[in-house]
Amino acid sequence: MNRNMTDTIDVGAVKTYLMDLQDRICAALEAADGHSRFKQDTWSRAGGGGGRSRIIENGGLLEKGGVGFSHVFGDGMPPSATAHRPELAGRHFQAMGVSLVMHPLNPHVPTSHANVRFFIAEKDNADPVWWFGGGFDLTPYYAREEDCVHWHRVARDACAPFGDEVYPRFKAWCDEYFYLKHRQEARGVGGLFFDDLNQWGFERSFAFLRAIGDAYLQAYLPIIERRRNEPFNEQQKEFQEYRRGRYVEFNLVYDRGTLFGLQSGGRTESILMSLPPTVRWGYNWQPEAASEEARLVNEFLPARDWLAGES
């Protein structure tokens, strides 16, 4: 892949879009929650840049949610970056993005995650190195095929203008990326994941980022409305907390954004705001055979084609 593309790169346009996306997502989720509002925490980074973290807690719908915008920059890349991309050494970098995680109170409403980001590294007398990345994925606690199909249909439709091969490729990448190798188990039912995107040139790559960012609410809000009033009991809440433990394990062991943020001197509270408010672990805990909990683990978490048969 050629990262040293020479077409015009409009960093300001990317930043403007990302900040507006954060505003739009927060407004829509506040309206959906109907009880709590996002609180904003503006922060600065000692090495350069900063961001605004927005947190909602103890809501009518959302037990905890975070929507963060960050724009950090500086000289010298963290080891997690240069180990895989030695061409980044000695460059001034900028990294910006919007990242969000929603942890609903009701275990029948899935957790959702989305991230869209842009990276550029520059030095004198050399072409810039840049790329886009991101995606969105769904982590249900109870198996609802209708929700999973809707989520993936929105993902496919967002990718469609960019080529028929895009959704299958980035869907497969998501299945591979959000996988806990030490558990031999997926985190959820996937969606889209892409990184190092620059081969289309800046304008088309940026258009794809916008398509994915704008699709998140189209994918998530209908699922919220379908499930938010379903009754649940203490056992179902406990299962949600066990599954949230898998979420924590992935974020702290594998997630590239978490590792980059911590190693580059990012703000810890903002980096870890994605973690759920209550989590449960039990030694060798397994769901009961033939239960709804077992159905999720055995039938829904293994990677599958959610849109099989659709044109």
Image (cartoon, rainbow, N blue to C red):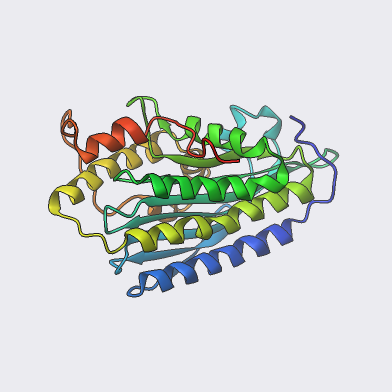
Q: Where is residue 106 in the image (x, y as percent from the top left)?
A: 27, 58
Q: Would you say 193 lies left or right of 119 here? A: left
Picture residue at 30% right of the left edge, 45% below the top: 141
Picture residue at 61% right of the left edge, 49% below the top: 157
Picture residue at 27% right of the left edge, 64% below the top: 229
Foreground pick, 109 / 12: 109
Visible in this render: residue 136?
Answer: no
Q: From what the image shows, is residue 125 above or below residue 109?
A: above
Q: Position of residue 256 (x, y in %)?
A: 50, 38
Foreground pick, 105 / 259: 105
Picture residue at 29% right of the left edge, 45% below the top: 142
Q: Would you say 272 lies left or right of 241 here? A: right
Q: Would you say 242 lies left or right of 265 here? A: left
Instruction: State how many labels appear.
Output: 0
Q: Would you say 32 lies left or right of 16 here? A: left
- Find residue 283 and report its image quarter: top left
Foreground pick, 120 / 228: 228
Q: In which quarter of the image is the N terminus?
A: top right
Q: Where is residue 304 in the image (x, y as percent from the top left)?
A: 45, 31
Visible in this render: residue 207?
Answer: yes
Q: From what the image shows, is residue 259 above or below residue 228?
A: above
Q: Where is residue 93 in the image (x, y as percent from the top left)?
A: 67, 46
Q: Which residue lies most toward the left here?
A: 234
